[in-house]
Image (cartoon, grey):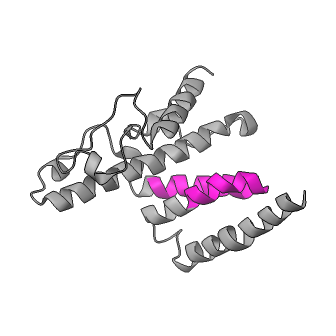
Amino acid sequence: MTYHEDYIAWIHNVVHMPTFHSLNAVDFMKNHSIYSVQAICLLIYIGHNSGQSDRISVLLASASRIAQCLGIHRLGSETPLRILKCDDPDTRSKLLIDREVSKRAWWFLVRQDWLQIPFNNTYNIHPSQFDTEMPKNCYEDVSKMGLPTDIVEQNKDRYSQGSYTFVLNKGVVYQNENS
């Protein structure tokens, strides 16, 4: 039990508190950015293991709202023309990667929100109020992504770094549709 208590103390002192201080230092509730959303996603990911469920619920709602303010919930399924028509291959590649990162952050929030339904009997992100498609099952190695034209999606049976979350996302969608 000592190891567990030491681990929780370490997480609190080395991860949680510095992250909270950093988020507050940039005034994340006023100055919205994908970086704040990502930082909160990491806090949520590890927070459940350290007995922070109430704090995690509030952070989840905050991150969801920040993501909505950034328009991450309305990315759609088609790559925007402003990205496709971008003449500079490096800029186009960066925009495509940023879009994929945003989809991953959004779907992490969706997944966490919907997984809380059995405990809270409610959710904050309604399926009819976003159109951001699930992230692609793609490689994270830039040389294998297919850039700069578009990010190549791998077959669902082919393992990539995103395969695990791809399966989790499908699971929460199935759970939500059948509950």
In magenta segment, residue 22: no
Q: Residue furthest right?
A: 1
Give the residues drawn in magenta, as a range: 40-67
Indicate the position of residue 145 as horizontal and vertical percent values.
28, 46
Q: Nearer the viewer, residue 15 or 80?
A: 15
Examine the rendered structure and indicate whether residue 82 appears above or below residue 77: below
Examine the rendered structure and indicate whether residue 62 appears above or below residue 18: above
Judged by its main secondary structure, the magenta piece is helix
Q: Residue at x 54, y 63 (%)?
A: 39
Indicate the position of residue 67 as horizontal and vertical percent values.
46, 55
Q: Residue at x 73, y 40 (%)?
A: 120
Q: Is residue 41 left or right of residue 104?
A: right
Quadrant the N terminus occupies: bottom right
> Quick check: can you spot residue 112?
yes
Quadrant the C terminus occupies: top right
Q: Is residue 160 left or right of residue 29?
A: left
Q: Quadrant of residue 33?
A: bottom left
> Quick check: can you spot residue 52?
no
Q: Is residue 41 left or right of residue 71?
A: right
Q: Residue furthest bottom?
A: 25
Q: Residue at x 39, y 30 (%)?
A: 158
Indicate the position of residue 126 as horizontal and vertical percent values.
52, 37
Indicate the position of residue 32 as horizontal and vertical percent values.
45, 66
Q: Nearer the viewer, residue 51 or 70?
A: 51
In magenta segment, residue 59: yes
Q: Residue furthest top?
A: 178
Q: Is residue 148 left or right of residue 177?
A: left
